[in-house]
Image: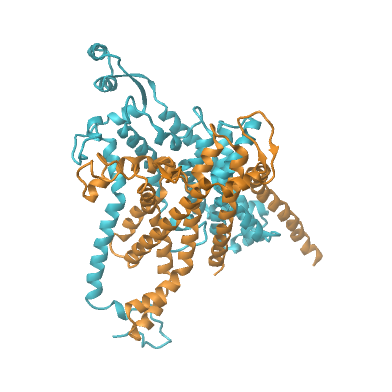
Amino acid sequence: MSSYNQPARRRHIGDKRLIQMFVIPTVLLLILMNVFPLIYSLYLSFTEYSAINPTAPKWVGLDNYRQVLSDNLYWHNFAVTGRYALISVSLQMIVGFSLAMLLKEKFKGSGILTTLILIPMMLSPAVVGAFWKNIFNPSFGIFDQMLGYSDPNTAPEWLGNPNLALWAVVIVDVWMWSPFVMLLSLAGLSAIPDYLYEAAAIDRASAWFQFRRITLPQVMPLLLIAVLFRTIEAFKQFDLVMGLTGGGPALLEGRQAVNVTETVSVRLFRLAMPPQAQTGLSSAMAYVVLVIIIAISNLYIRSLNKIREG
Amino acid sequence: MSTRTAAPTSPVTISTRVDKVGRRPKVMRGIRAFAVIVITIIALLPVVWMIMTSLKSPSDVVAVPPKIIFKPSIESFIFLVTERVQFASPQEAAEYKARDDLKWYEEKVAQRGQKITRVGDFPKQLRNSFIIAGTSTIFSVLFGVLSAYAFSRFKIPGEGDLLFFILSTRMLPPVAVTIPIFLMYRELGLDNTYFGLILLYTTFNLSFSVWLLKGFIDEIPKEYEEAALVDGYTRLQAFRKVVLPQAVTGIAATTVFCFIFAWNEYAFAAMLTSDATRTAPPSIPSIQGVGRIEWETIAAASLVFLIPVVIVTFALRKHLLRGVTFGAIRKG
């Protein structure tokens, strides 16, 4: 018996080393490139420091956080991001879910159409922004033309008008990401067992009743994942805005000029990069954003795990 | 009407749903198919418009109202790969145009009163994108497959937390992470180097690759390896000769996803690269024309940049759902 056990035990020790060999590179890389930088920037967020200045970081305590949380301009950035996230994610959910309802029942060619609809989601947001800029142009762009404005003088200037610019970003974002919601909804819809509908039909339940009592509750977990994921992404919104509006145009609000599409990430970028290069202050702002995103991510990963196990 | 009265001993394999019989569903299906086709066309319109713009001549691009029918031209692609200057005077331009040693593309450019001075930056940026996205993908998948195997097959202390930590790094906003990385890289002399960006993209994609690959490896029956171990294979051999071949599809899908993410990435590239290592995404929105915004050049650049992604989307279509949910949801 003992001689039979021998090789097994040796293999067991081998396994342990194997696990270490296989997992350690990943963990080390993540610590080096994610954890360490975050600790470093936590320190910087309590200092007055500029990356383009030779002066060493000077400890200022909570000053940076106080400034970020008390200055109207920063609140404006958070408000823009919040408004944008709310509108954009809601629209994506509506459009994406409706699309999924249309595609739920397969028909000839529905597979290829689904893939075609998914294309925008795979494109680079910065590049998408660059060519949508042309589409939105009031004189030679196609967007206003499609809406029926043939005179460039009266056509809405989507990117230049402070009242419309955020909507322009929302439109492009909805175009890009509704397919994502569609994909998740389709997965949820196709997993609903047929017998539920059969039972409902036998009971002569109305279509609306079936939708509310069977369809919706059954796809809810996946819709929740879609909402959380898109919300996280919306809070990180950066590339698309940079490609499309660069954060502008400016609007006079009270006595301050504010940039109407300047999301927190765009502001962070400007604050951190030269010429401003306010490294300490931008680190503090980054931490405020981080806390928000980590909170939402937490919910997201939890619901992912629930689905994995379920 | 109902077929569900069959005896329980003979299971109904094809269920006829009572609500799916009759003519109404057929008409509904027609309406649905029509609606989907219309929506697909609308969804693809921006991309079609981009392709059209890339084929327009400079004057057609800014025509009011926008031209739907036009004479195709490939000038934009010449503009894209060249650096040009405007002639100071029409006289000078005419003299240049009259020369008979001009190549066909030089002639095209000469008609716009411009002269090619050198090869443009775009080919180099595209090459940078390839090198950086390609190399980082190899490393993300390599480290990813090793870790995914370990997480899939062994009990690792704190496994749940570790996996949670790995995925949470993926959620961080790039802009927030880049500030300290920029300082770190400057200290180490890694800013504006291929190595720096490759290292960053590798890490960025690693969490994704671990999660996705773990899902794929979980699906390979453990019994295969166990049989191999009984046959005297070491664990490493079993991994190489049994698990890896079984995981080929998953590895391929992961590779393509990682490549697309790195290929499309903008924020890190915008902050950590400049001339020599700059990739295409931060360059395309800031393409400067000679004396005007060259919309056709921007469209041509976007087109060249997006084509690989579109092709790959088709290749990946069966795995898209898995990819976008980090492997959590397998089947649609």
Quadrant of res B73: top left
Q: Residue B1: horizontal and vertical position, in percent?
A: 28, 85
Q: Which chain is orange?
A: A
Seen from the viewer's position, the closer of residues B59 and B167 is B59
Going by the image, does A205 lie left or right of B251? Answer: left
Q: Residue at x 58, y 52 (%)?
A: B210
Q: Residue A150: horizontal and vertical position, in percent?
A: 19, 45
Q: Is residue B318 visible?
A: no
Classify A168 as above or below A214: above
Going by the image, does B271 lie left or right of B228? Answer: left
Seen from the viewer's position, the closer of residues B297 and A76 is A76
Chain B drawing hue:
cyan
Quadrant including the C terminus of chain A:
bottom right
Q: Residue at x 32, y 31 (%)?
A: B294
Seen from the viewer's position, the closer of residues A294 and B207 is A294
Q: Residue A99: horizontal and vertical position, in percent?
A: 34, 62
